Image: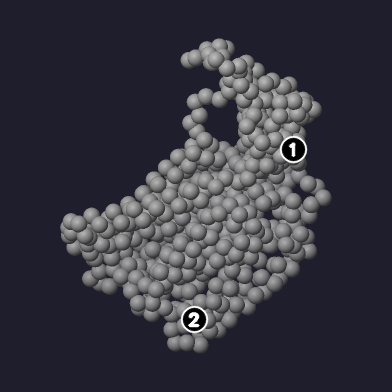
Amino acid sequence: MRDTQTPIATSESPQLCGVLAEFETVDALLAAARRVREAGFARWDAHAPFPVHGLDEAMGIRRTRLPWIVLACGLMGVLVGLGLQWWTNAVDYPFLISGKPLFSWPANVPVIFELGVLFAAMGAFLGMLVLNRLPEWYHPVLTSERFRRATSDRFFIVIDADDPRFDRRGTSELLESVGGAVELLEA
Amino acid sequence: MPMSHEMPRSADRDEPHRLGALGPRVVRVAGGIGIAALLASVVLGSLQPDGIERLSRTYLVSFSYVLSLALGALFFVILQHLTRSGWSVVLRRLAETFAATLCWLAILFIPVALSVRSLYGWTQPAADDALLAWKQPYLNLPFFYVRAAVYLVLWAALARFFHSRSTRQDGSGEPALTLSMERWSAPAMILYAFSVTFAAFDWFMSTDAHWFSTIYGVYYFAGSVMGFLALMALAAIALRRAGRLTRSITIDHYHDVGKLLFGFMCFWAYIAFSQYMLIWYANIPEETAWLVVRQSGPWGSLVIVLSVGHFVLPFFGLMSRSAKRRTTVLGLWAAWLLVMHWVDLYWLLMPRWSGEHIPFGVIDVTCLIGLVGVFIAAAARVAARHPLLCVGDPRLAESIALENA
């Protein structure tokens, strides 16, 4: 592990990556998230040690598109399962098994079912990673000493510096005005 | 459990949570229609030469239908205690109520018990029928009646156990009652599983006594639970329209019932196909004879209707989150699946007697309306005596505060 206290050695001066605000309660986090959303920010996130009901609504996160990806993958698995058995059993290498037709659907259903489930599960897992932009090995927020409590007893909002509405003073003041303890993130 | 700013609400005392005047009205109307329809069925039956036999057979189909709904309810109640569920407390009284009709269904079994000779060929086996002779130690009338009595008494007792304790808790709020129901839920579930399996063997599978399928009981069970979940969704929607339980049963509860309905609908398809595929693959005449009748001619078309209507359409129709969260959409699918469930049982039982053609006629409809009417009247009679909500349950507040992610 790299020592997080030591900044990466660069010739340039440290660059501002974003602003971090710490809150002590869920209510403060939810109230702050509503304000940040109303202010029109797009590139920001909230962090909490446990799932917080109502946080998605407060942040204005729209429902995930993942189910559609899973459905498409599942249907693809069905087609692959059907095609595979049709090609191998009925076309490429016809082989008579217990007097059944070469292409008989009841025998194909278990493989179709399993491949449908497999593809859907893979689609759910990989789709989740891609939509969450994971894996992400490093984020500037990890340099903050304060942020370590995000896994135990504190709540955070982080606004990225590349958000179109971001400006150093204004954004910090907004987060302070909703009761956050603000820290600038540099890397 | 929500861990956030909002404390769970406790029972909403202002919300109408009793049937009130609606109870006796439902009993009168449903019971009146039901009894009239049953009488009409008897009249229709006696007009034809072999009409009474015909009636006994369609009666068995519709009896298996209402019985399955009550048994599905009993399963739901036992399962909630077995898993110590909090989310379902606002719905549990509905299930307890439908399960409590099992003592009435024991009375409705009497016509079946009286018409064993037209229903079960094993009661008059041919002299040279070695297979039935071999099965005789199990398939004989005295033992059949003893077993039937055991199942019916057991179900009525289980339903009464859970219903009476739960309603006693309405007044006292005593947590010990919950604990005792939870303690008994595991043995109750084991007894339930065996009794439903063997009742399905005895009453429905043995109509075709040469044939057997070990998964038959599970098949009946899968349809039962699906049918009950559809019924519970419709009952909750009907109560909401009538201004009862408008706040306690929230969209999140409908959503969860919709998920279970979807799940058990798929489970039915899975079991139905499992039964079919093994018989198809092994291709042993002893087993295939049963399917040959059911997949040829008009009955074969019904297989397609069931595959599409009982699985493919509702699979896509109930899949999305928004379908399960809209009471109209959920209600339409629930009603559709309740129809399909009856078609399934008709397909399961009727070909034994009708051969190649589908004998569907007015008598099937009147008999179904009759039994469903009596079933609803019995449920409304039980429901009218108690709150529609487990108002004394320690987990009521937790249930009302349910939130789906």
Q: At x 51% / y 88%, what residue is drawn? A: B47
Q: Eyeballing the image, is A38 above or below B132?
A: above
Residue drawn at (27%, 55%) of the image: A85
The answer to which quarter of the image holds residue A42 is top right
- Mark 2 or 1: the one toward you: 1
Q: Picture coordinates of residue A102 (x, y %)? A: 22, 62
Disc 2 + disc 1, Cβ < 8 Å: no
Residue B191 shows in this picture: no
> Does residue B120 appear left or right of residue B68 in this picture?
left
In the picture, the quarter occupied by the N terminus of chain B is top right
Q: Which residue in the structure is indicated by mark 2?
A: B361
Residue denoted by label 1? A39
Taking B79 as reference, is B309 above or below it? Answer: below
In-image side of A186 versus A92 (left or right): right
Q: Residue A114: x percent and y percent?
A: 36, 49
Q: What residue is rendered at 52% in x and 35% in y?
A: A133
* Residue A25, picture quadrant: top right
Quadrant including the C terminus of chain B: top right
CA–CA distance in space, label 2 to label 1? 67 Å
The answer for which chain carries disc 2 is B
- Between B192 and B342, the one nearer to me in the picture: B342
